[in-house]
Amino acid sequence: MNKIIFPDGFIWGAATASYQIEGAWNEDGKGESIWDIASHTPGKIKNGDKGDIACDHYHRYKEDVQLMKKLGLNAYRFSISWPRIFPSGTGKVNQKGLLFYDKLINELLANEIEPVVTLYHWDLPVSLQKIGGWESLEVVEAYVDYATCIFNHFGDRVKMWITFNEPMVFTLGFYAEGFFGERNVRGGIMATQYVNVAHAKAVEAYRLSPYSDGKIGITLDLSPVYPKTDSSLDKMAVTIVDGVTNRLFLDPVLKASYPRDILRIFKDIFNLPPIPKEDLQLLKNNPIDFLGINNYFCERVHAEKPGDLIDIEALLKKEKIEGREYSEMGWEVYPEGLYDLLMRVDKDYNHPIIYITENGMACKDDKIINGIVQDDDRLSYLKRYFAAAHQAIRDGVNLKGYFVWSLMDNFEWLEGYSKRFGLIRIDYKTQERIWKKSAHWYRNVIAENGFDIDS
Ligand code: FCB
């Protein structure tokens, strides 16, 4: 027996996001989000999949809370669909939208599961994209109004808030890949700054709201970056990629600053204006209570010649390296990377309180025996990542909880339903929920607050 036990009070959870599970895309007065448009655009999503029904969670939330209860979850992280609350982004509140989340939150609390709410997990109301999306100050103001409405309505029952999920993906990522039409890297960089302003203003609004006795933070997608070889060019590539994918997002929310080396590179290439002083002040005045980290993989970067160093997208191309382990997403499985990442954030950012707000693995899940999905690969992944997190806690990291992505299989954005991340399998034809081996194992982990690493 080689048992790992987590600290008392450690929070075990699972995570989802509104568009990925809810369905009911046009019910009860909901407005359209940019993902409804993407879903309905031929050729955009793999296999023509749509989020119209997804896991039908909008109608099956009670059954899903029972699944959580059976798993023994301490907490459940989900996001609110902005266009359910404000169908056109601003203006009149849709009461039926509030009602759905009232029912979900009350159901969670009645089952002793703590609701952890993400305000924005990528489903921007379409009308706000039309006026400039995250490059527009009007959208920033609309977000703060939306956040304020949510804090006022649910703040009596929700005590853990996340302003944004993965700003890098919906700013730099979406803009660079041309999600909104033309590729527009400059727009993506500007959007990161607007999102930071929106984030800080939402934190400010929370502190001023009637129920401000909870905690508020942000979720960043972070990955440790390693050089592919020992060359000095590869080491320089590490500094740049780490700067653009990690420090550019960590520094504003934890140090109220932007990494100078990266700003210099951006300025040279894109002729960007300086960051307004008042934006930095706003970030400084509104620190977070905790940092949410989503981690799925590590980066290994390589540059052949000095010119390669400024082509960040090329540096981030994921090539498979002989002998390494990859998930169905093509992401490198590297639990040591989670350990390195946690230690580094702890050291460089003054020992913040951290939650892993997402971690998990897409697997084939093609074997079902006696009604149980045989996802040994996912189970092994979770075991090794949990062990890495535990080691980081032993070495001093202030890690307070872990949310597995995801509670159930769901609409994996551009990949549609082709990738399965759930602890629970969804049969999309019948909407049946089917337990996987990893879910049974996770239930024991939660019950014992630990597990035997050798079994
Ligand atoms: C993260 C997203 C989440 C999910 C996982 C696999 O980047 O936050 O919605 O798609 O990846």
Image (tube, grey):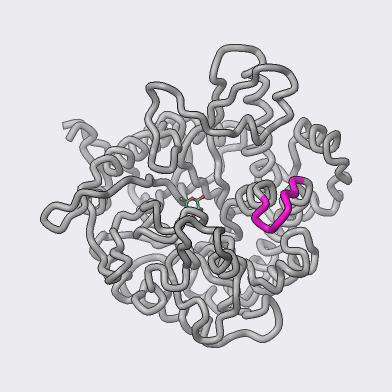
Residue found farthest to the top: 231
Q: Which of 392 and 298 is in front in this view?
A: 298
Residue found farthest to the front: 42
Q: Which residue is drawn at 40% across and 49% down?
A: 402
In the image, is residue 182 part of the stretch drawn in magenta?
yes
Determine the image quadrant of residue 285: bottom right
What is the span of residues highlighted in magenta in the rendered image? 178-185
Q: Which of 43 and 185 is in front in this view?
A: 43
Number of numbered markers: 0
In the rendered view, does 424 fall on the left or right side of 346? left
Query: Is 296 above or below relative to 13?
Result: above
Q: Nearer the viewer, residue 269 or 232?
A: 269
Residue 296, percent across and down? Answer: 46, 41
Query: Is 377 above or below relative to 217?
Result: above
Query: Quarter holding the C terminus?
Result: top left
Q: Residue at x 35, y 66 (%)?
A: 113
Q: Residue at x 63, y 30 (%)?
A: 315
Q: Nearer the viewer, residue 27 or 140?
A: 27
| Any part of residue 91 in sight | yes
In the rendered view, does 272 fall on the left or right side of 75? right
Q: Which residue is drawn at 32% across and 66% down?
A: 428
Query: Quarter holding the N terminus?
Result: top left
State whether the magenta stretch is mostly helix, strand or loop.
Answer: loop
Residue 187, percent across and down? Answer: 77, 51
In the rendered view, does 149 fall on the left or right side of 13? right
Query: Is 105 above or below relative to 113?
Result: below
| Any part of residue 119 in sight | no
Residue 197, percent across and down? Answer: 74, 57
In the rendered view, does 32 fall on the left or right side of 416? right
In the image, is residue 345 part of the stretch drawn in magenta?
no
